[in-house]
Image (cartoon, rainbow, N blue to C red):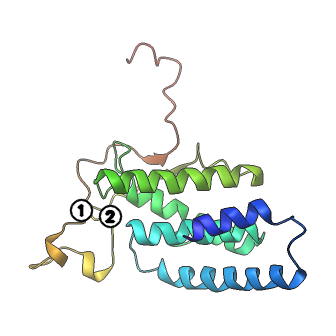
Amino acid sequence: MMLDIASIYDLVHDEDCWTEEDHRRIEAAFRLYIEKVDWMITDGDTNNIPSGGMVGAFLCSLVIQDMHWIERFLHGPGGFDDMVATGIMDDGWYFEGATNYVVLFADMFTRLAQACEPWGFDLKNRRVPASYRREAMLSPWSLPAEKPFLGMSFEKFGPVRRSSRGGPRRLGRHAAIRR
């Protein structure tokens, strides 16, 4: 929801209908949300809920033009770099595996990449070091146990052979030979 609110506010920010008080209150609401998400994404989860919270807070940070929070949600714990390094598997698929979550993750991160372009952040082509942990999430409730949470596994599927995650892989000058 905050993804849409931040995006819409960004589109209509300069319209004459807003008072200075309106802008102040909206910024205050965004800052409350940002601070809540800052806390929420530090527990080691990479699933759709913290991913959505992080993207929403990142977009709010862009709208209010706060570089401290922009940098935090790009590089900090549970931020963009962490989510991509941990949540994207070796084959480029999102770790939750269900098609609806893959589409949700792709939609959120594509919208974020587009929003970051005017700021000079090329998230579409950004590569981050891969996470080599077997588990996609580190929160205590998600770790392997005798009786897993709702019977679910949060382990990544398949081997980790690539050293980075993110934008297009560069194949080099011999790409045609390797097809």
| Camera sees residue 88 | yes
Q: Position of residue 129 (x, y in %)?
A: 47, 53
Q: Position of residue 87 (x, y in %)?
A: 39, 58
At x 19% / y 78%, what residue is drawn?
149
Q: Which mark is residue 144?
A: none
Q: Which mark is residue 136?
A: 2
Residue at the left extreme of this rendering: 146
Image marks 1 and 2: residues in contact by CB distance under 8 Å: yes
Instruction: Identify residue type, mark 2.
Output: Ala
| Camera sees residue 73 | no
Q: Quadrant of residue 138?
A: bottom left
Q: Is residue 148 left or right of residue 131?
A: left
Q: Is residue 70 above or below residue 162?
A: below
Q: Nearer the viewer, residue 42 or 40?
A: 40
Instruction: Identify residue type, mark 1.
Output: Glu
Q: Position of residue 104 (x, y in %)?
A: 43, 56
Q: Position of residue 127 (x, y in %)?
A: 53, 47
At x 45% / y 14%, what residue is drawn?
176
> Is disc 2 surrounded by few (<14), some (14 to 19) or many (20+) residues within 10 Å?
many
At x 69% / y 71%, what residue is drawn?
61
The residue to which callout 1 is attached is 155
Is the N terminus in the top left, top right, bottom left or bottom right quadrant?
bottom right
Residue at the top extreme of this rendering: 177
Rounded to the nearest whole Å, what is the CA distance between mark 1 and mark 2? 6 Å
Q: Earlier in the sequence, mark 1 or mark 2?
A: 2
Q: Nearer the viewer, residue 40 or 163?
A: 40
